[in-house]
Image (cartoon, helix red, strand yellow):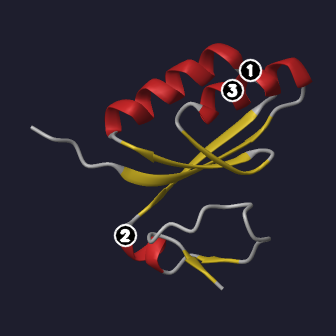
Amino acid sequence: MSQTNLWYLVAYDIRESKRWRRAYKIIRGYGKPLQYSLFRCRLSSVQLEQLRWELEKVLEPEDALMFVGLCSNCVERTILRNRVGVWENESAFRVV
């Protein structure tokens, strides 16, 4: 049985630089950075839980973490503005 992969925006606010770097490396293994503390990840439900579990081992109560699930309609309506070469132009995202 195949699992459906969905797009997620993963945002975090981590107060200590060492924990921030560890979290960045973990999330980078699952997706692409959009900004310093914002990633775009395409994950199955198992991968989503695995990522949350890995991050929970790194984060402290003072840190913040947010996963925003994007339905296919949300992904199609996403509008990007960026410098050439900063973000990949994937068909799931529209660059203006």
| Element type where label 1 sits in the image | helix
Return the disc, 2 or 3, that comes first in the chain's sequence. Answer: 3
**Label 3 Cα crowd, 10 Å radius (few <14 / some 14-19 / many 20+):** few
The amino acid type of the residue labelled 3 equals Lys
Query: Between 90 and 52, which is closer to the camera in this rendering?
Result: 90
Which residue extends farthest front?
85
Q: Which residue is mark 3?
A: 25
Residue 59: x and y in percent read 71, 21
Give the residue displayed 74% in from the left and 60% down from the top. 86
Q: Which residue is mark 1?
A: 22
Quadrant location of the C terminus in the rendered image: bottom right
Q: Quadrant of residue 76?
A: bottom left
Residue 64: x and y in percent read 74, 37
Give the residue displayed 73% in from the left and 77% down from the top. 81
The amino acid type of the residue labelled 2 equals Ser
The reply to whether discs 1 and 3 touch (Cβ–Cβ < 8 Å) is yes
Q: Which residue is mark 2?
A: 72
Question: Is 3 left, or right, of 66 in this rendering?
Answer: left
Residue 60: x and y in percent read 75, 19
Give the residue displayed 89% in from the left and 29% down from the top. 15
The amino acid type of the residue labelled 1 equals Arg
| Element type where label 3 sits in the image | helix
* C-alpha distance separating marks 1 and 3: 5 Å
* C-alpha distance separating marks 2 and 3: 27 Å
Which residue extends farthest bottom?
96
Question: Is 85 left, or right, of 49 in this rendering?
Answer: right
Question: Is 74 left, or right, of 95 in this rendering?
Answer: left
